Image (spheres, grey):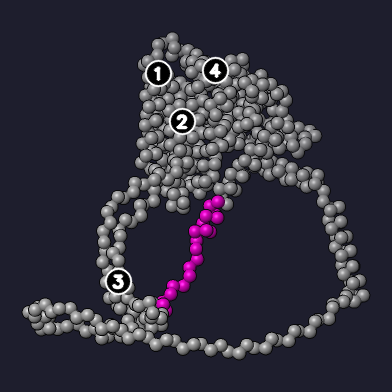
Amino acid sequence: MIGWAIETMVASTLLMLVVLALRRPVAVRFGAHVAYMLWLLPALRMALPRLPALQDQTSAVPIHLDVARLIAAGAGETTSATAAIAQPSVDWLPIILALWLAGALGYLGWHWARHLRFMRLALTRAEGGDRRDGIKIWRSLAVPGPLATGMFNRHILLPHDFERRYNGIEQQLALAHELAHHRRGDLIANNAALIMLALHWFNPVAHIAYRAFRADQELACDATVLRNAPSARSDYGRALIKSARAGLPVVACALGPAAQLKRRIQMIAHAPDSRRRHLLGGSFAVVAIGLGLGLTASGGVAAPSRVAPAPVKPLFLAGQTASARPVALAARTQDRQMPSNAEVDRWDDAPAAASVPEAPRAPMPPALPMTMAAPLPPAPPAPPSPPWRMSADEARALHEASGRARETARRAAADFDAQAITRDAMAQTRMELARECTHARPAPANESDQEAIARLSAGCVDYAAINREVQDALREAADDIRDTEDMSAEARTRALAAIDRARAEAARHFHQ
């Protein structure tokens, strides 16, 4: 079992490296859906059991061993072998397994607790509750942009200024993006990937692969939305720019995470939409997954040996005792002398003589009967100990000690103030956020600790850096459109105008 677990961790790490190397060229050639499908390879390898090995059908081969000679040769080494017993060493395997399991449970529990705390805060400050396809849609003050969350109780959380920030088409595209996450089962995939990442908590390759997996997931969801609305690429790009945020829970699916925003805009402009490419890409993904699982699957336990030993003649008689066996063996070994070469030649020239039967052994004398010693007389019973009695002073001291303990417990319970502890914790959090978040808006008058925490959390994002990255991405997209030869002049003009509008909108949005 331990060997299979080690093989699984190593094989899944190798497959992560393979997917990291293939994901970008596969996305460019076949589309984002195929690149996202490749991440099934390490996930399925983690759940792949050990495959049974073929049994080795070998024939039974008799083996003849001279057991008497082996025992005679090792009889003189028994004392030295028993004296050289190795000292017991520390078994590190249970310690390593305990540390690995504690790290996995701690990592998984920390992320889930963070997600539950975020959901509790977001739903507490939410309003609305409309339903679409069984999914609740809320407007919350605690979310900076649209996001989908929840595996069983499915929610879509929208910012409180959703109608003011996005126009009509952008609102429809944003809702379509989050609904696509729920319909595709991306929230279930995120939780499964988080469990796999917790098992690889010590592995830096797994953390890099998880971030790449989430980026490919967003690109695949973008392709799903644009497949249903191919003429709304510019509007969808503006919606992504307006939703660029960072610092969200790992299992939630946001519309515009700040990471990989440049690549998403480039994929929107140059996403392959040929049905033939999609079919070829799906076939490539299926073949790659099957080949990777077949090459890295763990084999079964080796077949047991089919070699049959030949029967061996017993060395000792049944009547001999255990103490007499080594003495008889040593006597027979000393009496047996090796013949010389002359004697061997004389034996070869002599005619074969008839075999002389061995004389019967003399019977052993019967053992003397063992005499039993006389039984000892029973010991006299011990005298009973006198009953213990507590004096009046000892009873009074015990009563006073119990009274002091009750009074101490009562005072400790009276001094416990849960509300004061909560206020101190929120004040400490507010101080830490005020020290670390330098991009927050000025504090309004009479602001509570909860409102200050929400304002400072939104201020931890460097909007100027995001604006520079977005502007660079849009500038590179415009250069790519100018250099392409597959577009007409009218289409190129419309695309460049849309990019200019997006740049202006991004500059105005991040300046606010």
Direction from residue 114 to residue 185 in the image, left or right: left
* Pointer 2 residue: 36
Q: Nearer the viewer, mark 4 or mark 2?
A: 2
The magenta-colored residue range is 82-101
Q: Are marks 1 and 4 in contact (CB under 8 Å)?
A: no
Q: Is residue 316 visible?
A: yes
User: Quarter holding the C terminus?
Assistant: top right
Q: Are marks 2 and 1 in contact (CB under 8 Å)?
A: no
Marks counted in the figure total 4
Give the image location of residue 80, x and y in percent. 38, 80
Q: Amino acid at mark 1?
A: Ser
Mark toward the start of the polypeptide (2 vs 1) = 2
Q: Secondary structure at mark 3?
A: loop
* Pointer 3 residue: 313
* Pointer 1 residue: 274
Residue positioned most to the left? 349
Foreground pick, 59 / 498 = 59
Mark toward the start of the polypeptide (1 vs 3) = 1
Q: Are marks 1 and 3 in contact (CB under 8 Å)?
A: no
Q: Amino acid at mark 4?
A: Asp
Q: CA distance from mark 1 to mark 3?
A: 80 Å
Residue depicted at 40% across the width and 11% down the height? 488
* Pointer 4 residue: 235
Q: CA distance from mark 1 to mark 4?
A: 22 Å
Give the image location of residue 287, x and y in percent. 36, 31
Q: Is residue 468 visible?
A: no
